Image (cartoon, rainbow, N blue to C red):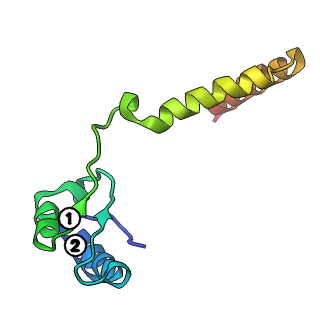
């Protein structure tokens, strides 16, 4: 685990070169065919990192734009919530308890 902020240079020197590349070689061989997945953090997408991946023939998984509409998990959660509610709608007592607890949380947040 890395402490403090990480920039592209640190990412290459402390993660990619000593950890990712040797692990990939162990798993897939020296000329192994694999696709590396990472998120869109600035240190991951910096030009120096992109260049490093090209120099080491590491293929990257392409990420779509950062939009909730394009994030499939958001659609899944919405659908799951609807299906659960159809199977077991809250009773009036549960609904009142939820509303009371929500108000209590909101009130305690403003109290502090």
Residue farthest toward the top in the current orientation of the protein: 92
- 69 vs 60, left or right, is right
Seen in the picture, residue 56 relative to 102 is either above or below; the reply is below
Seen in the picture, residue 58 relative to 94 is either above or below; the reply is below
The image quadrant where one finds the N terminus is bottom left
Q: Quadrant of residue 52?
A: bottom left
The residue that appears at 22% across and 72% down in the rendered structure is: 12
The residue that appears at 17% across and 64% down in the rendered structure is: 49
| Viewer-nearest residue: 110 or 96 | 96
Residue highlighted by disc 1: 8
- 9 vs 95, left or right, is left
The image quadrant where one finds the C terminus is top right
User: Which class describes the residues within 10 Å of circle 1: few (<14), some (14-19), or many (20+)?
Assistant: some
Q: Position of residue 83 (x, y in %)?
A: 68, 26
User: Which class describes the residues within 10 Å of circle 2: few (<14), some (14-19), or many (20+)?
Assistant: many
| Viewer-nearest residue: 101 or 67 | 67
Residue highlighted by disc 2: 12
The residue that appears at 66% across and 31% down in the rendered structure is: 111
Secondary structure category for the residue under label 2: helix
Q: Position of residue 43 (x, y in %)?
A: 23, 59
| Viewer-nearest residue: 48 or 29 | 29
Whether residues under marks 2 and 1 lie with C-beta atoms below 8 angstroms apart, the answer is yes
- 19 vs 44, left or right, is right
Q: Quadrant of residue 20?
A: bottom left
The residue that appears at 24% across and 79% down in the rendered structure is: 17
Q: Position of residue 4 (x, y in %)?
A: 35, 67
**Distance between mark 2 and mark 1 Cα atoms:** 6 Å
Secondary structure category for the residue under label 1: helix
Seen in the picture, residue 41 relative to 112 is either above or below; the reply is below
Q: Position of residue 107 (x, y in %)?
A: 69, 26
């Amino acid at each position: 685990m890395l402490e403090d902020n990480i920039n592209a240079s640190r990412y290459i020197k402390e993660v990619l070169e000593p950890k990712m590349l040797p692990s990939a070689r162990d798993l897939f061989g020296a000329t192994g065919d694999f696709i590396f997945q990472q998120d869109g953090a600035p240190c991951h997408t910096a030009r120096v990192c992109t260049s490093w991946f090209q120099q080491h023939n590491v293929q990257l998984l392409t990420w779509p734009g950062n939009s909730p509409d394009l994030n499939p998990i958001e659609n899944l959660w919405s659908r799951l919530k609807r299906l659960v509610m159809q199977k077991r709608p809250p009773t009036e007592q549960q609904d009142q308890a939820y509303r009371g607890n929500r108000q209590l949380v909101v009130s305690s947040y403003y109290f502090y």
